[in-house]
Image (tube, rainbow, N blue to C red):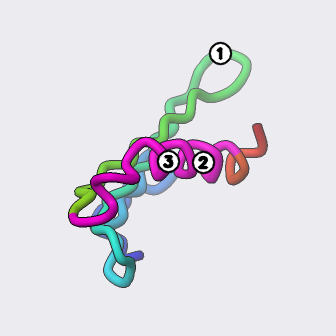
Amino acid sequence: MEIVHLDPNRRLAMHAVEVPMPMDVTYEVEPRPGGSLARVRVQGDAGGLYRIAGPLVSAQVGRSIAKASGT
């Protein structure tokens, strides 16, 4: 992953440079009373065989995000 934007303690945007499917991942954190709100956005362009497997790829990305966030 290549960092394309960094706003410390607020936003991190990355672009995948060495994967079979191009994607961009953005993490945003917003202070809230009693804690923080975290948002993760993943955008990708599934082409070729990945287009057929789109729903499976989407589910796997969701599981990976949940695992990384500890939920």
Residue at x 53% of width, y 50% of height:
61
- Mark 1 lies on a secondary structure that is loop
Which kind of residue does numbered mark 1 sit on?
Pro
Viewer-side label of 3, 2: 3
Earlier sequence position, callout 2 versus callout 1: 1
Residue occupied by mark 1 = 33
Identified by mark 2, the residue type is Ile
Residue nearer the viewer, 55 or 42: 55
Residue 48 percent location from the top left of the image: 23, 66
For the point 63% across and 53% down, which residue is it? 64
Residue 61 lies, with reference to residue 18, above or below; the image says: above
Q: Residues within 10 Å of mark 2 (few under 14, many from 20)?
A: some
Query: Mark 2 highlights which residue?
Result: 65
- Mark 3 Cα-neighbour bin, 10 Å: few <14, some 14–19, many ≥20: few
Q: In this rendering, which labeled residue sits more in front, label 1 or label 3? A: 3
Residue found at the very far right of the displayed protein: 70
Q: Which residue is mark 3?
A: 56
Q: CA distance from mark 3 to mark 2?
A: 14 Å
Residue numbers of the magenta segment: 48-66
Q: How many marks?
A: 3
The residue shown at (39%, 55%) is: 25
Helix, strand or loop at label 2? It is helix
Main SS category, magenta section: helix
**Is residue 22 found left or right of 12 in the rendered image?**
left
Image position, residue 66 (x, y; %): 67, 43
Q: Is residue 55 above or below residue 36?
A: below
